[in-house]
Amino acid sequence: MDPSFHHDLAVSGPMARCCSDLELAMQLLSPPEPVMAKAGWSFQLPPPRCTDVTTLRVAAWLDHGKYPTDRHYLALLEAAVGALEQAGALVDRSARPFSEAESEKVIKTYLGFLTSAGEAFGGSDSYPLLEHKKNAVRRNFIKETYEEFFTRFDVLICPVLPIPAFHHTEKHILQRTFTGEGIRDFDYLGMQFWPGVVIVADLPSTVLPVGRTPDNLPCGVQIVGPNFHDLTCIEVGKILERIHAPCRFEAPPGFGHDEALSPGLASRL
C-alpha cells in the first residue's frame, strides 16, 4: 500500500512509490487544463502547513467504539503516531472531529448520500431527490465541523479500514462478513466507516504503509488534512517516511525495479 490522495484509489491500489512521487504528481495534475487556464480559470494548492515535525499538531483517531480497529493493526498505528510524538510533534489522542454518537450520524449521511444520489436521477419518484438534497445540507454542516477542527490541528491520523488487507473471494462483497484480531465479525457497511467519515467532507488523504501484522498482512495509515491541503498530508507522509521505517515503500517480491522491467526497457531508462 503506497501513498494516495483519493480514497477510491487509496484502498484499491498504489499511486506512487513514495510521497515525493505523489507530490510531483499533484504539481502536475492540480493546475487547470490549458484551455481552461486561457479562459481565466486558475488554481493553486496551498503550501504545506508544516514542514518541521516539532511544530506539527496531530489528532490521532485510531479506534471507535462501534467500529473498532483490529488490535494488531491498532498497535502499528500507535507505533507510527508514537514516532511522530517522539520526534517532537504535538499529538492529541483524545481529539475527535465528532463524538461517537455524532460520527454515527456522519456515516449515515455518507451512506445515505450514496444511496440517494444513485436513485435521485434514475426514477420518477421525487422523494429520493428530496432526500439527496437533505443529505447535501447535512454534508455542508459536516464540512463546517471539520473546518473548525482543523484550526486546532494540522492533520488527522486514522485507519484506512477497520482491518488489515483481507482475502479476495468470488463471493459478492455485500454478502461477506469480515473479522479482525480482538473484534467481532461485521459486514461490508462496517468497512465504510473510516473512509466514509473522510470522503463525505471531500477531504484530502494520503495513505502510507504502516507495517504488517503477525500474519504478514499489510496495513496502512491514513493522513487526513483540511480541504485542499493535499500537500500538507503529503508532507506529513514524507516526515513519517523519514522517521518511521515501516512507512517506507518496500517492493513486493518479484516487483522490484529491475525485476518489473524487461531488460530492453530497463536499458532505455
Image (cartoon, helix red, strand yellow):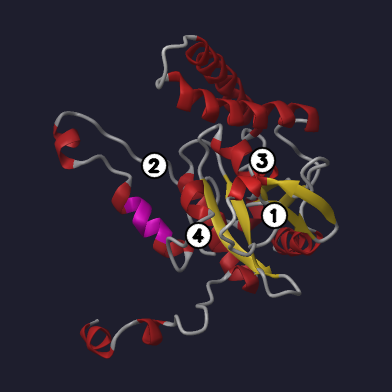
The disc, 4 or 1, on the residue closer to the chain's N-terminal end is: 4
Q: How many marks?
A: 4
Give left or right: position of 32 versus 250: left
Residue bearing mark 2: 45
Tell me the CA gap for discs 4 and 3.
Answer: 24 Å
Residue bearing mark 4: 3
In terms of secondary structure, where does tag 1 sit? loop
Tell me the CA gap for discs 3 and 2.
Answer: 33 Å
Crowding at label 2, few (<14), some or many (≥20) Cα neighbours within 10 Å? some
> What numbered label is drawn on residue 41?
none
> Is 11 situated above or below 150?
below
In terms of secondary structure, where does tag 4 sit? loop
> Is 211 situated above or below 208?
below
Q: As rendered, which of 191 and 81 lies closer to the eye? A: 191
Q: Give the image location of residue 138, x and y in percent.
A: 59, 19
Tag 1: amino acid: Ala
Residue bearing mark 3: 189
The disc, 3 or 2, on the residue closer to the chain's N-terminal end is: 2
> What numbered label is drawn on residue 89?
1
- The magenta-colored residue range is 22-27
Give left or right: position of 233 versus 176: left
Tell me the CA gap for discs 2 and 1.
Answer: 24 Å
Q: As rendered, which of 172 and 206 lies closer to the eye? A: 172
Crowding at label 1, few (<14), some or many (≥20) Cα neighbours within 10 Å? some
The disc, 3 or 1, on the residue closer to the chain's N-terminal end is: 1
Tag 4: amino acid: Pro
